[in-house]
Image: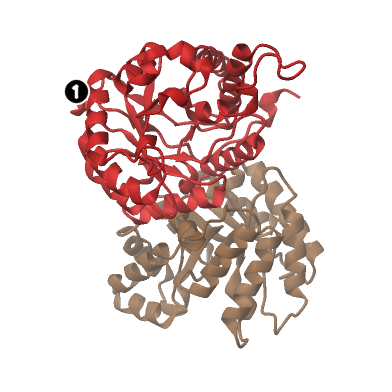
Amino acid sequence: MYLIGERINGMFKNMRAAIGEKNKQVVQEVALAQLKAGAQALDINVGPASDKPLDAMMWLVEAVREVTDAPLAIDTAKWEVMSAIVPKVPGHAIINSCKADEAELDKYLKLAVDCKASIIGLTIDQKGVPADAEKRIELGATIAAKAQEAGLPMNHLFIDPIIIPVNVSPATPKAVLSALAALKLISDPPPHLVLGLSNVSQGCTERKLINRTMMSLAQSAGMDALIADPLDLDLMNALVAAELLLQRTIYCDSFIDAYKMGAKPGEP
Amino acid sequence: MKASETAQRWAAAINTVTIGATAAEKGTRGKVVTIGGAKCIPWMSYEGDIGNRPAIALEVWDSRGETWPAGLQSLYGDALKDTVTWAKKAAEFGADLICLRLDGTHPDLGDRGADESVALVKSVLAAVDLPLIIWGCGIAEKDNIVLPRVSEAARGENCLIGTATDKNYRTLVASCLADGHKLLAESPLDINIAKQVNILAHDAGFPLENIVMFPTTAAMGYGFDYVLSIMERGRLAGIGGDQLLMQPVLCDVGLESWRVKEANAGDDSMPGYGPLAERALMWETLTATNYLQAGGDILVMRHPGAVKLVRDTIDKLVAGAKALAA
């Protein structure tokens, strides 16, 4: 499982404060803690913390780069931020994210290919998040086809079939699971399939329970990458157990430690 | 479909492990043996490098040579009566390494003491300059007395010493670490325990890249397929990136194949069995060559004729792999 740690995000209070005060140490501690807990890459999101998102993003990237070479997922919806930052990220960058809109895909994929970066394609088009599995699969196939045309190596492509809160849209988890299973088959080798997990429980109670249960179901359906909180120990242990039960790792009595030993930062 | 169309890309390689130390490495061996390094399913060089060629060790005991089968007595002669002469004979027979088995330290098989074993290890090291595998009797209490002493006596020679098990590993791990030896990690035909012994040794501070796995060996016809499938699962996981299964593998071929009925029953014991001498030789040879197909890195053997046949097979496999290389 390729795990992208989600904790460097201006939505979190400590991060919002750190960005405001330019407190590198807090950012670096969170970066290292996530890697120690088993993350292979780190998501970097300025959130609503700054009125100068480009400067704040660059500051975060530089702060994290001082302590790790792990791939960084540049998480912004603003093209002007993405296109300015990604060429400047030392080491591997993951473009997070791009919608399945033809014109948008063209420019984002070109950026990914030019910078040898990875990219997360969302199964969202101009009409928004699809209600069913079929549209997700169709948009996923569009992303994969476009990526191949653009010359992006398949191991640099992530498709995210978009999970939304279960209290708002109760049918979505099942649609996402069906889409994951189908998208696994769209090419050989297949693209990575990823979810921004915590969105499933936005506004719900028992968030961590919902998150990790959704994760296990998605692992079973073929998800092989995840944006989540590596510092959630129950989540991590469930992740490891599911990898074992799905025969992606070999059992030993110390299987949790054994899995974490093998989870090292690196390109997807 | 051409075989190469099934080629897969693997994330990792089996660890490369060197046994023995020459004067340049502050030991006294005439050469070292390096195993492992494969980045493919055994011999499938169109996927990746096949790594170092498998090595052949010849078995030498500290006592009880008279219990060896008649077919081997006739080849080794009086050498079986004296461990040092026996080791020299094994070197003459073309061994890459000597596998010195301290079975005589077993409480029921002579109960030899640590002092005696230390003297013996020193004599063998002085008599032959091949890298050494030193194998305890398997009784934890006794191994924990004898092996630290022989480890210390062989300090700097970079031996492979075993075995560590999931129930008894701390003492041997500490000795091998202190004296600069490689560790032979044993598991009872169980991939999960093979992995567990490695993580236990790792947690005790031993480098994973200094471990050789012994996943138990069976002779052809005697549970052989279980071992083969376990070795294959281990290899696939190892080259797939599981660092707790990236260790090269030792197969104890001679001991196992010479104790089965087919290697001992007389010429006329069963219709179609054929002459014992040839049959026993082939039982050991085929057991060994089949383990080559599952990724065996060290084959511990006995019959010099089998050694020659297996070496020829390795030559052919290496040549074939070169021709098919990616």
Q: Is residue B44 visible?
A: no
Image quarter of the N terminus of chain A: bottom right
Residue on which disc 1 sits: B23
* Picture quadrant of residue B204: bottom left
Chain A in the picture: what colour? brown
Instruction: Give whichever of A221, B237 is nearer the camera.
Output: B237
Numbered marks: total: 1
Q: Is residue B148 left or right of residue A250?
A: left
Query: x%, y% of residue B5?
Result: 69, 28
Instruction: Give whichever of B262, B307 is nearer the camera.
Output: B262
Query: x%, y% of residue A164?
Result: 67, 75
* Picture quadrant of residue B132: top left
Relative to A250, residue B32 above or below: above
Chain B in the picture: what colour? red
Query: x%, y% of residue B14?
Result: 47, 36
Give the residue type that dot 1 points to. Ala
Q: Is residue A224 visible?
A: yes
Q: Residue at x 58, y 75 (%)?
A: A198
Q: Residue at x 60, y 75 (%)?
A: A211
Q: Is residue B287 left or right of residue B163?
A: right
Relative to A222, residue B277 above or below: above
Instruction: Give whichever of B74, A176 is nearer the camera.
Output: B74
Q: Is residue B17 left or right of residue A125?
A: left
Q: How is the image coloured?
A: by chain
The secondary element bearing badge 1 is classed as helix
Q: Is residue A174 left or right of residue A199?
A: right
Query: x%, y% of residue A258?
Result: 47, 57
Q: Name the chain letter of the residue that bears numbered label 1.
A: B
Instruction: Give whichever of B118, A200 is nearer the camera.
Output: B118
